[in-house]
Image (cartoon, rainbow, N blue to C red):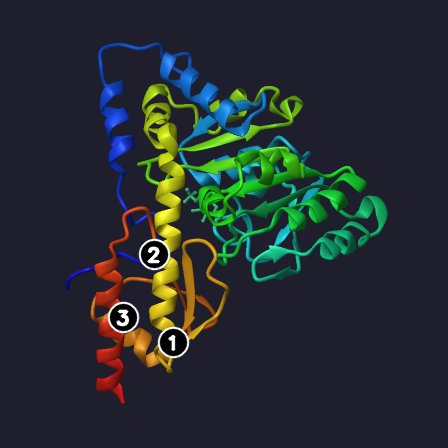
Amino acid sequence: MIHRNYFASDNSSGICPEAMKSLAEANQGYEVSYGEDAWTREVCDELRRLFETDCEVFFVYNGTAANSLALSALCQSYNSIICADTSHVETDECGAPEFYTNGAKLLLGKENQGKLLPESIETIFHSGRGLHFPKPAAVSITQSTELGTVYRPAELLEIYKVTKRHGLHLHMDGARLANALAFLSLTPKEITWQCGVDVLCLGGTKNGLAVGEAVIFFNKALAVDFEYRCKQAGQLASKMRFLAAPWKGLLAGGVWLKNAAHANQCAALFAAQLQTIPELEIQMPVEANAVFVKMPPRLIRALHDQGWHFYNFIGEDGVRLMCSWNTQEEDIRLFVAEIKKTLKVLS
Ligand SMILES: *Cc1c(COP(=O)(O)O)cnc(C)c1O
């Protein structure tokens, strides 16, 4: 059977040409290892320029490690981290945040369309009985969210207010930060450190890299000894230049934002086309690069049988369709046409 993976995830896509070019350029001769090389230095400086602030930057292999190690820098083992029940750290990291923090507990807050509610942080903070409860130390939010929505600056500031009031650190899982930026048309600082984010895990993989995420500490005091955490976790690349260099191609000339904007536009087009099919129902506002759509279960089964690969997400009939930097409009049209054809056969 042919496997049609176009819409399963934004990590089904390949490496974007600009990142590939930088990777090839870095593949010349010898370099210093473990992050002491010129490529790594240059990309760290570029990220500082982009975020318009002095910050500490580290590169790790994937998002699970980025999030878990970042959280481990914010917590003691007796602490807790408040996050949305839909968050990647809760549902998709196999307990790595708890593992790397040596036991800090994730406390699940209420969310609306993937966005953690500030009042829920407040409620959780005041629950429990003193030292019998794992002491909240951090809040973790995802931008854009796991449900394809985007926090507005005002919403981020509401969350920041609660964290500040209670002395909690703020972690942002930015696996798809670029998609949020492209949607909001704001500068990186406006939805990160200016909204109180202490540490950001900036995604590269889904945006067009082969591998690699950046952990960016705006609160530099929290970055103390972070390189030791990376090393101990097996996340310190010896040939670091190959993790860093592709970022150069991705960031130069705003390619990362162009990639994200393309993915977002594809998702918008996708949703517009799906909306014309009466048997389907769009479940979430389409703001970033995801479309959540309710389909009759037998349609889902039939499409899977035809080789289309995508995931069930919200309930048994809610599926997630992801677009990436490389999504082709003709694949969207082909998929929509197959849905229509299949529905006719099934009816
Ligand atoms: C993809 C993703 C990550 C990173 O996942 P890895 O597979 O560990 O690289 C982190 N957070 C969110 C919200 C994601 O979608």
Q: On the image, numbered disc 1 is attached to which residue? A: 295
| Residue type marked 3 | Val
Q: Position of residue 201 (x, y in %)?
A: 51, 36
Q: On the image, numbered disc 3 is attached to which residue? A: 336
The answer to whether residue 342 is visible is: yes
Q: On the image, numbered disc 2 is attached to which residue? A: 266
Element on which disc 1 rests = loop
Classify the position of the N terminus by image quarter: bottom left
Q: Position of residue 281 (x, y in %)?
A: 43, 75
Disc 3 residue crowd, few under 14, some 14–19, many 20+, Cα 10 Å: some
| Residue displayed at 26% across by 76% down | 302
| Residue type marked 1 | Met
| Residue displayed at 26% across by 43% down | 14
The residue closer to the viewer here, 235 or 210, is 210
| Residue displayed at 60% across by 23% down | 223
Residue 127: image quadrant is: bottom right
| Label at residue 161 | none
Residue 196: image quadrant is: top right
Classify the position of the C terminus by image quarter: bottom left
Element on which disc 2 rests = helix
Of labels 1 and 3, earlier in sequence is 1
Disc 1 residue crowd, few under 14, some 14–19, many 20+, Cα 10 Å: some
| Residue displayed at 57% across by 62% down | 113
